[in-house]
Amino acid sequence: MSNSSPTAPIDRVPRLHELVDAWPPQRSLEVVAAPLRFIAFWAAVALPFLYLPLLVGGLRGQQVTVFVGLLFANVVALVIGHEHGR
């Protein structure tokens, strides 16, 4: 059994003003960028599976535009998600 009081964990919780003072704008940008990198990384992994039905059936007419759009989206996702997990 320990001798710590039941309010000890509450004393260690930082106050709101302490969090705001310790959170520079650069940190807030990272909070937004991390989930974006995560989503982009997994989109870059999953998007190539959408090429398969297009390529198996052959590219005709509007399908060429869809294929090029998917290819462009995959490149963008690769660039944005490149730093995920590092």
Image (cartoon, rainbow, N blue to C red):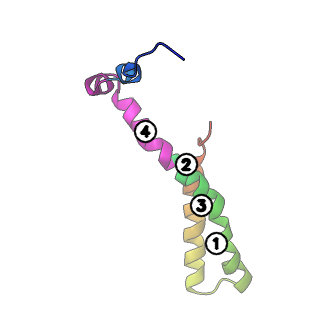
Give yes or no for residue 25 being in the magenta stretch: yes
Q: Residues within 10 Å of mark 2 (few under 14, many from 20)?
A: some
Q: Which of the labelled discs sits on residue 74, or is there none?
A: 3
Q: Residues within 10 Å of mark 1 (few under 14, many from 20)?
A: few
Q: CA distance from mark 1 to mark 3?
A: 10 Å
Q: Nearer the viewer, residue 37 or 64?
A: 37
Q: CA distance from mark 2 to mark 3?
A: 14 Å
Q: Which residue is mark 1?
A: 50
Q: Residues within 10 Å of mark 4 (few under 14, many from 20)?
A: few
Residue at x 64% of width, y 72% of height: 50
Magenta span covers which residues? 15-36
Q: Earlier in the sequence, mark 4 or mark 3?
A: 4
Q: Earlier in the sequence, mark 1 or mark 3?
A: 1
Q: Position of residue 60 (x, y in %)?
A: 63, 87
Instruction: Tell me which amino acid carries mark 3.
Output: Asn
Q: Nearer the viewer, residue 53 or 62?
A: 53
Q: Main secondary structure of the magenta part?
A: helix
Mark 4 or 1: in front is 4
Q: Give the quadrant of residue 27.
A: top left
Instruction: Tell me which amino acid carries mark 2.
Output: Phe
Q: Earlier in the sequence, mark 1 or mark 2?
A: 2
Q: Earlier in the sequence, mark 4 or mark 1?
A: 4
Which residue ends up furthest to the front in the rendered image?
A: 1
Instruction: Tell me which amino acid carries mark 4.
Output: Val
Compared across the picture, whether 58 is left or right of 68 comes to right
Mark 1 or 2: in front is 2
Residue at x 54% of width, y 70% of height: 69
Residue at x 56% of width, y 63% of height: 72
Rendered position, 46 above or below 7 = below
Q: Which residue is mark 2?
A: 38
